[in-house]
Image (cartoon, rainbow, N blue to C red):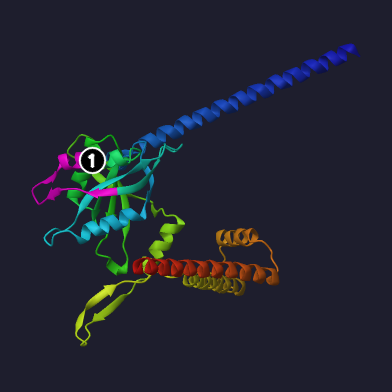
Amino acid sequence: MAKQTQKEKEKEKEKERERERERERERERARETDEQDQEQEQDGLGAAGFAASFLALQLGGGTIGSAQIDPGVHLAILAHALRRPDDLARVMGALLGSVSDETGAGDIDVDVRACFPLSITENDEEVSVDSEHLSQMLLLHLQQNPKDSLVGWYSTGNKVDANSALIHEYFASEFPIVPLHLLVDADLKDSRMAVKAFVTSEAGVPSSEFAGTMFLPVPCTVKMNEAERSVLDLISSAKPSVIEESAGGFVGSSNSIGILSDMDNLERAIVAVQGMIENIQEWVSGVKSGEIPANDSIGRYLLDTVSSVPLIAASDFEKMFNNHMQDLLMVVYLSNLTRTQLAIAQRLQNLV
C-alpha cells in the first residue's frame, strides 16, 4: 500500500511539471505574437505615419485647462473699446489675476480679476508693444493687489490673426507665464457679447521653417457672486427709451433704468421662480408623454433640488411668509419715519 501511494505521488508531480511546461510554452508563444504585431505596426507607418509625426502638435505640460473671468473685466474691456479712436480697429490690454496649482493632468486654471489697456501699435509691417507703459501699469497694480500677477492679454474682435500670434509670443517670451488670450466681441454681433479664451501650441517641426503657432480654445466661464449677478440682471434689463424735447422734437435715446425697491425686487424674484417652475412642469409633462427625450442628468438634478426643499404644510408656509412680510413692512415704515424726523430736525435747526 505504501509503494502504491508513493507511485501516485510521483505521477502527480510529473503531471504538475508537464502542466508547468505547457504554461511556459504558451507564454513564449504570446511573446512571439506581440513582437510580430509590433514589427507589423512599425512597417505599416510608411509615408502617412511620417506625415502624421511631422505635423504633430507639440503640446507640453502645464497648459491652461480653463479660465474664469470676473464680470468687471468684461465691463472694463467694453469701456476701453467705446473710448477708442475712430481709426483704431481694435483695442488690447493686459489681464491680471491668479493661476491655480497644477492638477494631476498637468492643466492649470486661470482666474482673471482685473485688466488695464495697453499701447500696442500694429500695421501691415510691424507690431510693437510699449514695454515701459506695460511695466509701469503692472507695477502700480501690484502695489494695490500684491496677490495678482500677469496672466495674459485681451483684444476686441471676433477672430485671431497673424498679429495676434506675434503679440502672444511677446507675452510668452517676456514673462514667465503661460499666457491666456481673451477675445471679446465688443461690436455685439447677434445682440450678444461673445467671449472666447485661447492658448497657443506649436505646430509642425520646432526650430525650423515648418514651425507654426495654433490658437486652441479653452473653456471660459464668468465668475460672479449673488450681488454681482443682481447688478448684471439690473443692467441687462435696461431698454432703449426715446428722449423728446418739450416741444416734441426728437433728441436721442437713452438706456437707463431706476433702482427697484425691496418690494419690487421681491415681486420680480417670485415671478422668476414661478416661471422656472412652469418650465420644469412643461419639461416633465413632455418627458412623461414621450414628446421630449428623457435626460438622466437633469432628472437627478431635479431630484436633488426637490429633496433639498423642506416639506412644509401650505398653511405653515403662508404664516411664515406673512410674518416675514410684516417684518419687512415694519422696517420700511421705521426707515421712512426716521427720514422724516431727520428732515424735520434739519428744518428746525435752519430756522433757529
Say whether residue 50 is visible: no
Q: Amino acid at mark 1?
A: Phe
86 vs 97: above or below? below
Q: Which residues are magenta?
A: 115-140
Q: Which x, y percent locates residue 233?
A: 40, 65
| Element class at badge 1 | helix
Query: Vertical placement of 232 versus 66: above or below?
Result: below
| Residue 168 is at least partly visible in this image | yes
Whether residue 253 sits left or right of residue 309 in the image: it is left
The crowding category of the residue bearing disc 1, from other C-alpha atoms within 10 Å (few below 14, some 14 to 19, many at least 20), is many
Judge by depth and name the residue closer to the eye, 17 or 86: 86
Looking at this view, name the residue that lies furthest to the right.
1
Residue furthest front in the image: 352
Identified at 21% across, 46% down, the residue is 165
List the single residue furthest toward the top: 3
Residue on which disc 1 sits: 171
Q: Is residue 87 left or right of residue 340?
A: left
